[in-house]
Amino acid sequence: MAHIIVVEDEQELARLIASTLKEDGHTIEVYRDGQFALDRIQDASAAEPDLYILDLGLPRVDGLTLCKRIRQNHITPIVMLTAKSSELDKVLGLELGADDYITKPVSLRELQARVAAILRRVEMMANVGLANQDAAAIEQSGLRIDPVGREVEFNRTQIALTAKEFDLLYLLASNPGRVFSRNYLLDNLWGDTYTGFERTVDTHIQRLRRKLSVAEGVDERIVTLWGVGYKYEKPDTVDA
Ligand code: CA
């Protein structure tokens, strides 16, 4: 079970979130003030939690600042709580590295489901050797994938990927030659709360390929196995 830090200044909502997640067996640490949360985040001697749930509007230090501060050192999953769609635009527009967001009023069942999906994904990533904070960058033929900063560069020029595109690329590239079925990718990168189709995986792969091929001028790293799934091949092993 997970250790979750919740930063929410609305007392009743914070209480409800904490008690709901405790029912699922998680350990919850609640902060209702942004500055106190920031102090906790910056305390290097305190254990890093498995997940953060951050409200956007907070006294003294806002949720965006907390999110940025966490991302300076950690890839810990972050779920943002936003009060209105204009705030949502801000979260998405700034691409601060939040993993998910929930708009208020918060549905506790939705929150439970999202938290479960994220924790499952992190566990899966750990199983395939990904979530390690000290994980080395993958470097192949000019492409550099940095799992800590979650950045991808080709010949030192950054390729802007969405969180999902990054997860896909990093999972595939960390396991060259291994075939991943669409179902596996859908279950593990999207979670079973996502009512999507295998087509969703194809769409994301297509976008990822397009971005890579624009940067590299070639489209050879991600191989489609028709009816089976996808695999990553190191460029030097790709057939001419
Ligand atoms: Ca608030």
Image (spheres, helix red, strand yellow):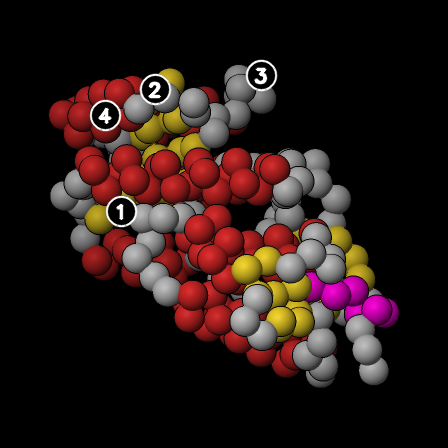
Judge left or right: residue 41 versus residue 173. Answer: left
What is the quadrant of residue 178 in the picture? bottom right
| Distance from Cα at disc 1 to Cα at disc 4 | 16 Å
Q: Which residue is mark 1?
A: 102
Choose between 236 and 27: the one closer to the eye. 236
Question: Callout 1, which amino acid?
Answer: Ile
- At label 3, the amino acid type is Ser
Residue shown at 29% from the left, 20% from the top: 22
Q: CA distance from mark 1 to mark 3?
A: 30 Å
Quote the CA–CA distance across marks 1 and 2: 21 Å
Q: Amino acid at mark 4?
A: Thr
Q: Position of residue 225 (x, y in %)?
A: 62, 71
Label 2 secondary element: loop
Q: CA distance from mark 3 to mark 2?
A: 24 Å
Mark 3 or mark 2, earlier in chain: 2
Q: Going by the image, does 115 lie left or right of 146? A: left
What residue sits right under mark 3 in the picture?
A: 45
* The residue at label 2 has a CB less than 8 Å from ligand 1: no
| Cβ atoms under marks 4 and 2 closer than 8 Å | no
> Which residue range is magenta in the image?
232-237
Point out the residue furthest to the front here. Answer: 227
Query: Residue 20, labelled with which disc?
Result: 4
Residue labelled 4 has its Cβ within 8 Å of some atom of ligand 1: no
